[in-house]
Amino acid sequence: FTHHATSVASAAAPCFRTAPRGSATHNCAPPRTRVNAFPSLARFSTLSNTSAPACSPLRSASTGAGGSGRGNGRVGSRRGASTRIDAVLDPHPVGTAEKAGASESTSNIVPAPSSGPSSSAVTTAAAGGVGSGQDTASYIAKVCVIGPDQVGVIAGLSQLMYGMGCNILSCANYVEDGVFFQRMSIDYSQAFCGNDNRDVIEASIANMAQQFELTSWKIAYNDDVHRVGILVSKLDHCLWDLLVRYKNNELKRCEIPLIMSNHEELRYIADQFDIPFMHLPMKVVDDDVTTKAAAKAAQEARISTALAEAKVDTLILARYMQVLSDDFCNTHAEHTINIHHSFLPAFEGGRPYHRAKERGVKLIGATAHYATAKLDAGPIICQSVQPISHRDSVKDMVRKGKDLERVVLAKALRYHLESRVLVHNNRTVVFD
């Protein structure tokens, strides 16, 4: 800073020495000259689509952009790279104005504040981004990572986003037993690679994940709509609730392209909401184990085919009363959500509320979890309970249990759609 300040002062000094006393220029303030405190990082603000994919911004931020690699702006963790500080302090990097044909005096004057669009907005508009009329909310994404806890991992992730020109809107992290979890919401509307160039953003995150040996990572874009399929049997309370919320836009970034059931009873509900309904019964000829297994396999094959044709990425078991096979659960792991009462494993099987009443339980509840090959033992997403007393009849308990199931399932689906659930070793971290 001292070196640059000295240069500015010496450059401005002749203006005061040569101006005649009493002239109009004698009492004027020295011309404002832009001080580029981080010259080695100046080229960061001219990053384009062609410069980003080949290198990791975390390790090669300045060198990949043409800098020296030893810029004065290095901050953060041990593994951090020099960050794009100069592009923020200096919205017009040295050399940009000269390339555009502007004079040297123009490039050295700090522009006065104005009510017009900022230089970054103009640049984005020229690239077809937010400045050209696109909604900024269209360029929001959620980045979730899981990996070993270590020094510098948070700084590394933050510097990566900063180096790519992404703004961090929110960030939550958690550490347990040496495992690091983080969910970050970013605005990539002004990313240097272009807000329509997702491959570069994802490749940069993948490079960083390799450097920090992350176990897993994912990025979910707000303008990508989830396609949710629903499996039901005869109980309708969860189906009604989901469809009403869906029609009221309470489940954002969500489409429901089909409803499937092993019974015909609930077709009328799907018809009221103009959603295709598929009846997929289990066709059992003889009541033996072999025939039932074959019928289940055939039915699940038809379900899988329907899900693939409808491009479903999330499956909801809205009180679907069939036990899914291990192969089906493994194929659709971590995107199949089940809901049931919270009496398990104490009251398995039929008539759980009757047996709970006989036992004199004082709490009833509901659990939403990801379905796994192990029945009703998948990673728990959401739970809720409600106290009851001896005055509650079985009918009262069933009604209260259904209320809880509605709310818990809707909340679990919302958490999933918003990428708030991170799964690790059959457990979840939910950033609610």
Image: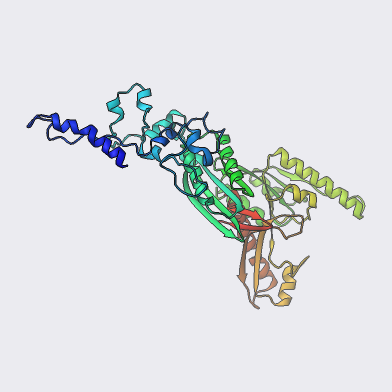
Would residue 27 appear left or right of 424 to someone viewing this image? left
Query: What's the residue at 62%, 67% (across, down)?
Result: 385
Between 240 and 16, the residue placed more toward the observer is 16
Q: Please give left or right for residue 146 compared with residue 137 in the image.
A: right
Nearest to the observer: residue 323 or residue 222: 222
User: For the point 30% across and 42% down, which residue is it?
Assistant: 2
The spot of residue 99 in percent (x, y) is: 38, 23
Comparing 232 with 67, the one in front is 67
The quarter of the displayed image where residue 287 is located: bottom right
Expressed as whole percent of the image width and height from the top left, the position of residue 155 reads 50, 49
Residue 163, position in %: x, y? 48, 40
Q: Residue at x 50, y 39 (%)?
A: 139
Q: How many marks?
A: 0
Image position, residue 364 (x, y; %) = 65, 69
Residue lying furthest top = 101
Residue 393 sits in which quadrant? bottom right
Which quarter shows the N terminus?
A: top left
Task: Decide which of 72, 334 is in the foreground and name it.
Answer: 72
Tell me how the rendering is colored: rainbow
Q: Is residue 254 visible?
A: no
Residue at x 91% of width, y 52% of height: 290
**Residue 240 at least partly seen:** yes
Q: On screen, 2 above or below 416?
A: above
Location of the C terminus (image quadrant): bottom right
